[in-house]
Amino acid sequence: MSYKKWVYKYKYLKYELNETEELKDKYQKDFNSKFTFKDKKDPEVVIPKEDELKPNPKKEKNKEIKDLYKKLSKKLHPDKGGNEDEFKELNSFYKDENILEMAIKAEELDIEIPNSDNFFSDDNFEKLCKNLEEKSNFIKSTLAWKWALATEEEKKLLLILFEQRHGVIPIKK
């Protein structure tokens, strides 16, 4: 797949994850107001830690990633007139070897990336996109998500399953 297609796919998945996270907050709040755990555990959704889904940070960075980071740093560093939050975000991208996010940032700043189609590997793009999909799918597998999207008929079955499998019971009002 071409660089541009990967960027569009990644941006789409990122927007989808953001939307899913927003809905998760709404669904979780509603779920928490209706259910409790028999053993009083906190029913809050636990999302995998960011570093559990990222490449090994001790791995040696390749020259292209370093060069792109340097170009971006010259524009984003607070001492060079950049924004501190954006610079921290760039450092996070660099640490995680998220060259796609770095490329998107370069595109926003009109920084040219030479040989962009050769610069990025399909494996790296696939891994980054899969990461976003897994995060979205994890959220969509939660009890709160299942409850929020269930029909009234499905909710009757879910009540039984929630109690049997997860120890979740409705709050009596």
Image: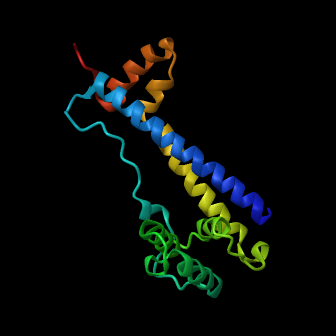
Whether 167 is drawn above or below 18: the answer is above
Task: Residue 118 in the image: state x and y as whole percent.
Answer: 77, 76
Outermost residue toward the front in this view: 81
**Residue at point 71% right, 55% down?**
8
Question: Looking at this view, is 94 or 79 the one in front?
Answer: 79
Figure check: 35 above or below 139: above
Task: Count the marks.
Answer: 0
Vertical comparison of 61 with 3: above or below? below
Percent x, y of residue 32: 30, 29
| Nearer the observer, 129 or 153 | 129
Instruction: Establish if 158 lies above or below 134.
Output: above
The residue at 38%/19% (across/down) is 159
Q: Residue furthest left?
A: 40
**Which one is nearer the viewer's eye here, 1 or 162?**
1
Is the C terminus in the top left, top right, bottom left or bottom right quadrant? top left
Residue 41, image quadrant = top left
Q: What's the residue at 62%, 85% (across, down)?
A: 67
